[in-house]
Amino acid sequence: MFCTPLKEFLSGDVFDGNGGRAGMKRSNLQGGIQVPLIVRWPARIEAGRTSNRLIANYDLLATLAETTGFSRPFNTDGISFYNELINHREGEEHEFVVYSSYTGPTLISDEGWKIRTDLEKGVFELFYLPDDFKEEKDLSKQRPKKREELKKKLLSACEGDLHNGLFSNQGSILKVPNTTKR
């Protein structure tokens, strides 16, 4: 008889593509968030190099702008990681990144702390990813101050409403300021 552990079954990852992490695309579990980014640019990027820098999809625009020399002003929450790509470690970095999901937003700090939400259930879970990449041990009861600190940062990043971090396939609105001059 074939038995699949419950957590693996719940992840929906029948091909084990998320390295044992729970979650799938658009979830706020690491299996739905953490993905590889592979860049090939032999003239500028050292082959085989890896990085543990904290980046998010919203950093791509700023990085592409810097890489191409785009100089017109634009608004973004992203931070360019161009210097990281070419192995120059200086430059601005995120204190944390925020992701939206079907159950609510999540925040991951540059120290490896993660607060994950399930807004419908009113749940805020706390994990320390360097020791628990599978998110099996909720530390919110052992570290209530850290949980509240990250919860405040998450609420601020969501402009005071955690529902701003709730992803939906219906009625999604992209807020883009009009910066074009005619």
Image (spheres, helix red, strand yellow):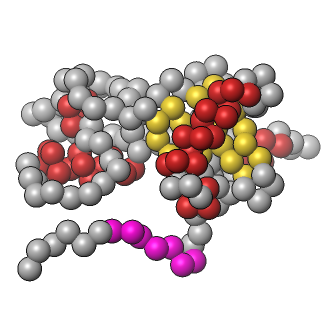
Q: Is residue 41 above or below residue 27?
A: above
**Farthest residue in the top direction?**
131
The residue drawn where x is 51% and y is 23% is: 111
Q: Is residue 18 visible?
A: no
Q: Tell whether position 175 is magenta.
A: yes
Number of numbered tags placed on the structure image = 0
Q: Is residue 94 above or below residue 27?
A: above
Q: Tell whether position 7 is magenta.
A: no
Q: Horizontal and vertical percent for residue 121?
A: 80, 54
Locate the N terminus and report the quarter of the image it occupies: top right
Q: Main secondary structure of the magenta part?
A: loop
The residue drawn where x is 27% and y is 37% is: 81
Q: Is residue 37 left or right of residue 13?
A: left
The residue drawn where x is 25% and y is 41% is: 80
Work out whether residue 30 or residue 20 is closer to the camera in this orientation and state it.
30
Highlighted range, magenta? 170-176
Work out whether residue 86 or residue 75 is closer to the camera in this orientation and state it.
75
Q: Is residue 55 visible?
A: yes
Q: Horizontal and vertical percent for residue 143?
A: 72, 24
Q: Is residue 74 left or right of residue 161?
A: left
Q: Horizontal and vertical percent for residue 147?
A: 68, 32
The residue drawn where x is 17% and y is 51% is: 65
